[in-house]
Image: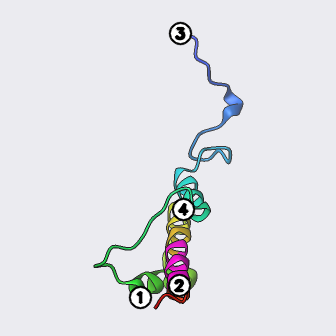
């Protein structure tokens, strides 16, 4: 029998609250400005706003960490767009 380094108290990654949340980490990086994203010229900001509104209204089930992170990233993109529109350069 081989010895492994896992401890039964470590929990299962899918149910362990200490498990790394890569989608949340990505959303943190976007919100914090460590990762800069922008909409492509062919992407519609109104469609992104509609997605956020639908998510906030609970239209997507089940809500999971990936969906929550996607909504956070979408909000950050929209905030950046709104900031650019209100910067007085137009």
Q: Within 10 Å of the Cα at label 3, are there few (<14), some (14-19), or many (20+) other Cα atoms?
A: few
Q: x, y percentage for residue 4?
A: 58, 17
Q: x, y percentage for residue 15?
A: 61, 47
Q: Which numbered tag is attached to residue 82?
A: 2
Q: Residues under labels 4 and 1: Cα distance? A: 20 Å
In front of the other: 16 or 55: 55
Q: Residues under labels 1 and 2: Cα distance? A: 12 Å
Query: Between disc 3 and disc 1, whose residue precedes?
Result: 3
As displayed, is residue 84 above or below residue 22? below
As displayed, is residue 72 above or below residue 42? above
Marks 4 and 2 close (CB-CB < 8 Å) = no
Secondary structure of residue under mark 3: loop
Query: Between disc 4 and disc 1, whose residue precedes?
Result: 4
Q: Which numbered tag is attached to residue 2?
A: 3
In front of the other: 45 or 11: 45
Q: x, y percentage for residue 75?
A: 54, 76
Q: Which numbered tag is attached to residue 46?
A: 1
Query: Between disc 4 and disc 3, whose residue precedes?
Result: 3
Q: Nearer the viewer, mark 4 or mark 3?
A: 4
Residue designated by label 4: 30
Instruction: Please report the bounds of the magenta region as a residue range.
Output: 75-84
């Amino acid at each position: 029998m081989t010895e492994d380094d896992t401890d039964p108290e470590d929990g299962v990654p899918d149910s362990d609250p200490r498990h790394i949340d890569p989608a949340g980490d990505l959303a943190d990086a976007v919100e914090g400005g460590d990762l800069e994203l922008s909409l492509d010229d062919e992407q519609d900001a109104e469609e992104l706003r509609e997605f956020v509104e639908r998510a906030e209204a609970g239209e997507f089930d089940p809500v999971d960490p990936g969906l929550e992170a996607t909504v956070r990233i979408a909000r950050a993109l929209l905030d950046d767009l709104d900031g650019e529109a209100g910067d007085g350069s137009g």
